[in-house]
Image: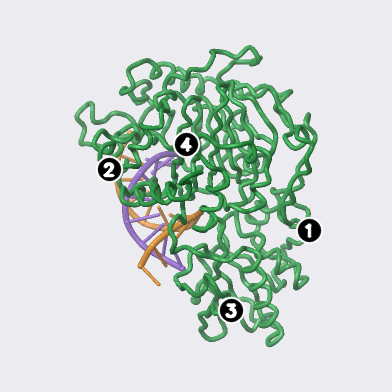
Chain colours: A green, B purple, C orange
Amino acid sequence: MATGDVETDSPLPVPDDLDDNGFPTAAATTSSSFADDFYRSGIDWSSLQAPPQHPREAASGTDAKGGGSLVQRSLFQAWGIEKPPREEAAPLVQRSLFQAWGIKKPPPPPREEAAQGFRDRSRVSSPSPSSSSGALSGKKRSWGGSEENGAPAARKPIACPFYKKIPGTPFTVDAFRYGAAEGCSAYFLSHFHYDHYGGLTKKWCHGPIYCTALTARLVKMLLAIDSEYICPLELDTEYVIEGVTVTLLEANHCPGAALIHYRLRDGKTYLHTGDFRASKSMQLHPLLQTGRINLLYLDTTYCNPKYKFPPQEDVIDFVVRTAQRYLKKQPKTLIVVGAYSIGKENVYLAISQALEVPIYTDASRRRILHSFGWPNLSKRISSCNQSSLHVLPLASVQHENLKKYLETHNQRFLAVLAFRPTGWTFSEAAGKELDLIKPSSKGSVTIYGVPYSEHSSFTELEDFLKFVKPQKVIPTVNVGNAANRDKMQAYFREWLKGL
DNA sequence: GCGATCAGTT
DNA sequence: CACAACTGATCGC
């Protein structure tokens, strides 16, 4: 979800029908079918607090806290299948099984501070769930109980919401802003977007962070997290972590984004989509073809029929054709593509290829893009701003700015054609017929908003659910509003009826 | 002064 | 309009 975490952006510490620990309240269980569903599901939601795991797995050579990743096996190898094709941007997957750290490198040994966090955890894993980690150490500030000493009601500490916890495991996903999450000894990061890694700072000490190798590089590079905590996992490779078999799958969201597949000791399979854009080719993955998923954590960012948008390829085609048309009319046109830190690379990569021009962007983004390790992208990146293709922060793609920007390049360019790729376009038309998109023009600056989404559309979600046939679905986005949750659950029930 | 959180922006 | 994902301002220690 992008957002997933809309919830985290909410001014309220916790959605109104969730308690301080992020669990649905009793009232909610009677009034909301959403919460109701959880309690009907037969899943033990308290399991995170007291992992039923066999204590120290023998396998775990080192301190079990780090989460032992001992077994590693390429899925596609094991299944004797070719990896499904991924497009241009996909990094070449390194197949060497022994290169990944799983086999050789021990899990990150908890250091001093880490040990503190873990001690913290073991303490709270006792039957009394209400005592949050707050009191333990004096260094606790934000989540410290200032309410305890009667200090003017600081904001209540926010506990990790239940939908970020994986029942029956000591795992959480994208939960870094809650300090040490109760019962959590391994933290998964689905991808490197702020609303998911928020809370990760160089002071992180609460446990190992599992993510793709690409995401791991970004975390190390941009957040200065101690590498001891960073545990890169290869895609399509099974790892056994704390007794749970974990596999990361390409999520088709931004570079490094992964779906996370868990297979528990008892055979239950859970899939967490992180943020993703569902596609037909995703359905070819062996792990998604083996029958039902018991529990699906779903990126519901666009889980509403009003969200329709074309395939990414169509939008890219439109962008490329539009750029070519403008350049033909005015060869001294500067093409600008807006982008967040990571994501939307295929839009400007396609322009670069079609127009045979390098990609200019500032040094900090160049560093990020090179870190992907994608030769086809790296070889097109240039530090020379004479190229007619520039990538700028999305926020700066607006008329005022671009006008100034053009003036600073006026010896080389006479006009600007800019694209703002966004999942959401207000125009209903744009969702169906790209050629109906009207740009906004002011003087020599033209800006197109294009419906290029890195989240699933409503119908893509429907297709995906009907294919995966989850026994139960937990939305991870737009969950702060009860009416919304009910609506989404109604869609899920409808889609899964009779399956 | 620093990091965490809030408010504002496209 | 509303959305994802920031970015900058302010708060609190």
Residue A226, picture quadrant: top right
**Decide: marks 4, 1 in contact (CB < 8 A)?**
no
Q: Chain of mark 3?
A: A
Q: Residue at the spot x=35%, y=52% of the render?
A: A484
Mark 3, secondary structure of its residue: helix
Q: Nearer the viewer, mark 2 or mark 4?
A: 2
Query: Which residue is label 1 attached to?
Result: A379
Mark 4, secondary structure of its residue: loop
Q: Residue at the spot x=75%, y=73% of the render?
A: A355
Q: Looking at the rendered structure, which numbered label has been put on residue A435?
A: 3
Distance from the alpha carbon under mark 3 to that under mark 4: 42 Å
Give the left or right position of residue A460, taking residue A143 as reference.
Answer: right
Q: Amino acid at mark 1?
A: Lys
Query: Which residue is label 2 attached to?
Result: A16
**Decide: marks 2, 4 in contact (CB < 8 A)?**
no
Q: Residue at the spot x=36%, y=23% of the render?
A: A138
